[in-house]
Amino acid sequence: MKRKQFVVIGLGRFGVSVTKTLIGNGHEVLAIDIDEHKVQEISTDASYAVQIDATDEVALEQLGIHKYSHAIVGIGEDLQASILITLLLKEMEVEKITAKAKDEHHGKVLTKIGADQVIFPERDMGRRLGNLIGSNHLVDYLELSDDYHVEEILVQKGMSHWKIEDLEVNRKYGCTIVAIKDRKQNIDISPKQDRVLREGDILILIGKPKSIQKMQKDYDKTVK
Ligand code: ATP
């Protein structure tokens, strides 16, 4: 993986977690917070850690922020600071800005002023957990867009010995099985139609969330 340079502004739980993950993946991170203690705590993990008020344009410029290809703004509570900092980063022509939003209104403003990616950690984690624990089959999923998901579906006992073709995922639900992961984590990419399913296999499929949900409901009824 190519080593990239990131700047993370706001070292709450979110900013710290992003920083540690980026560092763990071999990237360079400049970590910034207004609070000296937060800066000290991250100083052994981040490549550089600096205490400044990031709403201070001059202080940001002195750090050469424009040279960083991606900035992450992890401030949720202080709306004014979050918005002003995002605006300054935009003016400094930082290539990509990801900003954390506390709620939908905050998110809308961040998008309007030019954040390239707005994330809602609490809302998204809640939605994710709700989807995962509310389903009998869903193991994990990834939102490719609002319209398409990649989902991992557990093959249950009643479905074992079926062949992929028996599922008719494409004809009935407009979905495609892109891979199957077995219990030993072996991955079969583009599995053949006559591949036999075993209990504990995980189907990795791509499709519209509603269609995948319908498919799971139908299988629930069939295998009972
Ligand atoms: P989390 O949920 O990630 O723990 P939070 O939303 O509860 O975070 P916030 O109040 O959003 O916490 O603040 C996140 C961090 O941003 C804090 O460590 C805070 O000191 C820092 N911060 C706030 N304003 C500024 C600023 N102007 N410049 C730099 N850092 C700031």
Image (tube, rainbow, N blue to C red):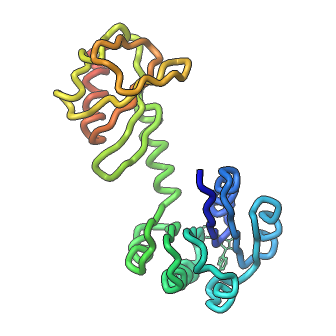
Q: Residue furthest left?
A: 171
Residue 197, above or below 170: above
Residue 182 visible in rendering: yes
Q: Quadrant of residue 62?
A: bottom right
In which quadrant is the C terminus drawn?
A: top left
Residue 224 visible in rendering: no
Count of labels in the image: 0
Q: Residue at x 35, y 31 (%)?
A: 178
Near-viewer residue (67 or 115): 67
Q: In x, y percent, where is residue 134? A: 42, 35
Q: Residue furthest front?
A: 2
Q: Quadrant of residue 15?
A: bottom right
Give the side of residue 25 with respect to residue 148, left or right: right
Q: Residue at x 56, y 81 (%)?
A: 85
Q: In x, y percent, where is residue 75? A: 59, 71
Q: Residue at x 29, y 12 (%)?
A: 194
Q: Residue furthest top?
A: 161
Residue 31, above or below 136: below
Near-viewer residue (213 or 115): 115
Residue 158, above or below 73: above
Q: Quadrant of residue 108?
A: bottom left
Q: Residue at x 81, y 65 (%)?
A: 43
Q: In x, y percent, where is residue 163? A: 30, 12
Near-viewer residue (33 or 106): 33
Q: In x, y percent, where is residue 168? A: 22, 22
Give the quadrant of ligand 1: bottom right
